[in-house]
Image (tube, rainbow, N blue to C red):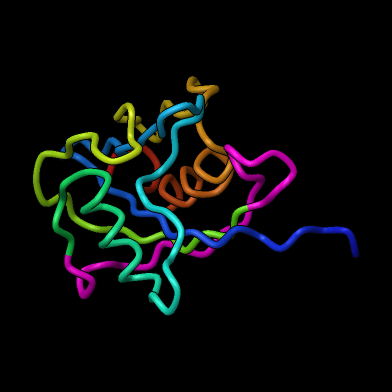
Amino acid sequence: MSDRQPAIRVCGVVLRDTTGRVLTVRKRGTERFMLPGGKPERGESPEATATRECAEELGLTLRAGELALLGRFRAPAANEAGHEVESTVFLHQLTGDPVAAAEIEALRWVDPRDAQGHSDLAPLLSGHVIPALLAMDGPGESR
Protein backbone atom coordinates (compact mmCIF):
# COMPACT_ATOMS: atom_id res chain seq x y z
CA MET A 1 0.00 0.00 0.00
CA SER A 2 1.63 3.24 -1.08
CA ASP A 3 -0.52 5.48 1.15
CA ARG A 4 0.42 3.57 4.28
CA GLN A 5 1.86 5.83 6.96
CA PRO A 6 5.18 4.96 8.60
CA ALA A 7 4.68 3.08 11.84
CA ILE A 8 5.16 4.80 15.18
CA ARG A 9 8.12 3.06 16.82
CA VAL A 10 7.71 2.15 20.48
CA CYS A 11 9.17 -0.20 23.07
CA GLY A 12 7.11 -2.06 25.64
CA VAL A 13 7.84 -4.19 28.68
CA VAL A 14 5.97 -7.21 29.99
CA LEU A 15 6.10 -7.20 33.78
CA ARG A 16 4.37 -10.12 35.50
CA ASP A 17 3.41 -10.72 39.11
CA THR A 18 3.90 -14.04 40.92
CA THR A 19 0.62 -15.40 39.50
CA GLY A 20 1.57 -14.56 35.91
CA ARG A 21 -0.66 -11.52 35.49
CA VAL A 22 0.64 -8.79 33.17
CA LEU A 23 0.87 -5.16 34.26
CA THR A 24 -1.01 -2.85 31.91
CA VAL A 25 -1.20 0.94 31.97
CA ARG A 26 -3.66 3.55 30.71
CA LYS A 27 -2.35 6.96 29.79
CA ARG A 28 -4.19 10.09 30.91
CA GLY A 29 -6.97 11.02 28.48
CA THR A 30 -7.11 7.62 26.77
CA GLU A 31 -9.33 4.54 27.05
CA ARG A 32 -7.05 1.62 26.12
CA PHE A 33 -4.74 -0.30 28.42
CA MET A 34 -1.30 -1.20 27.05
CA LEU A 35 2.15 -2.25 28.17
CA PRO A 36 4.34 0.26 29.96
CA GLY A 37 6.80 1.81 27.55
CA GLY A 38 6.94 4.46 24.89
CA LYS A 39 8.75 6.13 22.05
CA PRO A 40 12.54 6.21 21.86
CA GLU A 41 14.43 9.46 22.12
CA ARG A 42 16.86 10.30 19.33
CA GLY A 43 19.71 7.77 19.26
CA GLU A 44 18.25 5.70 22.10
CA SER A 45 18.37 1.89 21.88
CA PRO A 46 15.20 -0.15 22.45
CA GLU A 47 16.65 -1.41 25.74
CA ALA A 48 17.43 2.12 26.95
CA THR A 49 13.93 3.24 25.94
CA ALA A 50 12.32 0.37 27.85
CA THR A 51 14.26 1.02 31.06
CA ARG A 52 13.79 4.81 30.90
CA GLU A 53 10.06 4.58 30.26
CA CYS A 54 9.49 2.12 33.14
CA ALA A 55 11.39 4.44 35.47
CA GLU A 56 9.36 7.47 34.34
CA GLU A 57 5.95 5.79 34.20
CA LEU A 58 6.16 3.32 37.09
CA GLY A 59 9.09 4.30 39.29
CA LEU A 60 10.77 0.95 38.59
CA THR A 61 14.48 0.42 38.01
CA LEU A 62 14.98 -2.19 35.30
CA ARG A 63 18.35 -3.49 34.17
CA ALA A 64 18.88 -3.40 30.40
CA GLY A 65 21.01 -6.55 30.57
CA GLU A 66 18.06 -8.45 32.08
CA LEU A 67 15.59 -7.57 29.33
CA ALA A 68 14.61 -10.58 27.22
CA LEU A 69 13.14 -10.01 23.78
CA LEU A 70 9.59 -11.34 23.45
CA GLY A 71 9.25 -10.10 19.89
CA ARG A 72 8.72 -7.28 17.44
CA PHE A 73 5.10 -6.67 16.52
CA ARG A 74 3.06 -4.31 14.34
CA ALA A 75 -0.57 -3.40 15.04
CA PRO A 76 -3.05 -0.50 14.80
CA ALA A 77 -2.14 2.27 17.24
CA ALA A 78 -4.41 2.42 20.29
CA ASN A 79 -4.36 6.21 20.64
CA GLU A 80 -3.47 7.57 17.19
CA ALA A 81 -6.30 6.86 14.75
CA GLY A 82 -5.16 5.79 11.30
CA HIS A 83 -1.64 4.92 12.45
CA GLU A 84 0.17 1.72 13.33
CA VAL A 85 2.73 1.02 16.01
CA GLU A 86 5.78 -1.13 15.56
CA SER A 87 6.89 -2.31 18.95
CA THR A 88 9.91 -4.07 20.34
CA VAL A 89 8.55 -5.93 23.37
CA PHE A 90 10.72 -7.17 26.20
CA LEU A 91 10.17 -9.35 29.25
CA HIS A 92 11.67 -8.29 32.58
CA GLN A 93 11.29 -9.53 36.11
CA LEU A 94 9.16 -7.26 38.29
CA THR A 95 11.61 -5.27 40.45
CA GLY A 96 9.33 -3.51 42.91
CA ASP A 97 5.88 -2.07 43.41
CA PRO A 98 4.82 -0.07 40.34
CA VAL A 99 3.20 3.31 40.93
CA ALA A 100 1.39 5.33 38.24
CA ALA A 101 3.53 8.38 37.40
CA ALA A 102 4.13 10.83 34.53
CA GLU A 103 1.31 10.45 31.99
CA ILE A 104 -0.01 7.18 33.47
CA GLU A 105 -3.50 7.50 34.94
CA ALA A 106 -4.26 3.87 35.81
CA LEU A 107 -2.58 0.50 36.35
CA ARG A 108 -4.33 -2.85 35.92
CA TRP A 109 -3.12 -6.43 36.17
CA VAL A 110 -4.44 -8.76 33.45
CA ASP A 111 -4.31 -12.55 33.43
CA PRO A 112 -3.33 -13.54 29.87
CA ARG A 113 -5.72 -16.52 30.05
CA ASP A 114 -8.64 -14.12 30.69
CA ALA A 115 -7.54 -11.27 28.41
CA GLN A 116 -10.35 -11.80 25.90
CA GLY A 117 -12.70 -10.52 28.61
CA HIS A 118 -11.01 -7.10 28.45
CA SER A 119 -12.29 -5.19 25.42
CA ASP A 120 -10.23 -2.12 26.34
CA LEU A 121 -6.78 -3.59 25.64
CA ALA A 122 -4.60 -2.01 22.94
CA PRO A 123 -4.56 -4.01 19.67
CA LEU A 124 -0.83 -4.74 20.03
CA LEU A 125 -1.41 -6.27 23.46
CA SER A 126 -4.53 -8.28 22.64
CA GLY A 127 -3.52 -9.33 19.13
CA HIS A 128 0.18 -10.08 19.54
CA VAL A 129 1.65 -9.90 23.04
CA ILE A 130 -1.01 -11.93 24.87
CA PRO A 131 -0.94 -14.73 22.25
CA ALA A 132 2.88 -14.80 22.43
CA LEU A 133 2.75 -15.08 26.23
CA LEU A 134 0.14 -17.84 26.08
CA ALA A 135 2.26 -19.77 23.58
CA MET A 136 5.31 -19.31 25.81
CA ASP A 137 3.42 -20.37 28.96
CA GLY A 138 1.92 -23.52 27.48
CA PRO A 139 -1.49 -25.02 28.28
CA GLY A 140 -2.77 -24.61 31.82
CA GLU A 141 0.19 -22.56 33.01
CA SER A 142 0.31 -18.93 34.05
CA ARG A 143 4.05 -18.33 33.73
Magenta stretch? 63-84
Residue at position x 41%, y 29% from top?
28
Q: Image height check: is 34 above or below 11?
A: above
Tell me residue 92's x, y (percent).
Answer: 24, 58
Residue at position x 39%, y 35% from top?
112
- Observer-nearest of 44 and 125: 44
Q: Image height check: is 133 above or below 61?
A: above
Residue lying at the far right of the rendered structure: 2
Tell me residue 57's x, y (percent).
Answer: 27, 45
User: Is 24 on the left or on the right of 132, as rendered?
Assistant: left
Residue at position x 50%, y 42% from top?
125
Q: Which quarter of the rendered picture does the N terminus lie within?
A: bottom right
- Observer-nearest of 112 and 42: 42
Residue lying at the far bottom of the rendered structure: 43
Count of marks overlaid on the render = 0
Q: Image height check: is 84 above or below 1?
A: above
User: Is 105 on the left or on the right of 74, as rendered?
Assistant: left
Magenta span contains residue 67: yes
Magenta span contains residue 71: yes
Residue lying at the far left of the rendered structure: 96
User: Is 85 on the left or on the right of 116, as rendered?
Assistant: right
Residue at position x 28%, y 35% from top?
21
Tell me residue 110's x, y (percent).
Answer: 35, 30
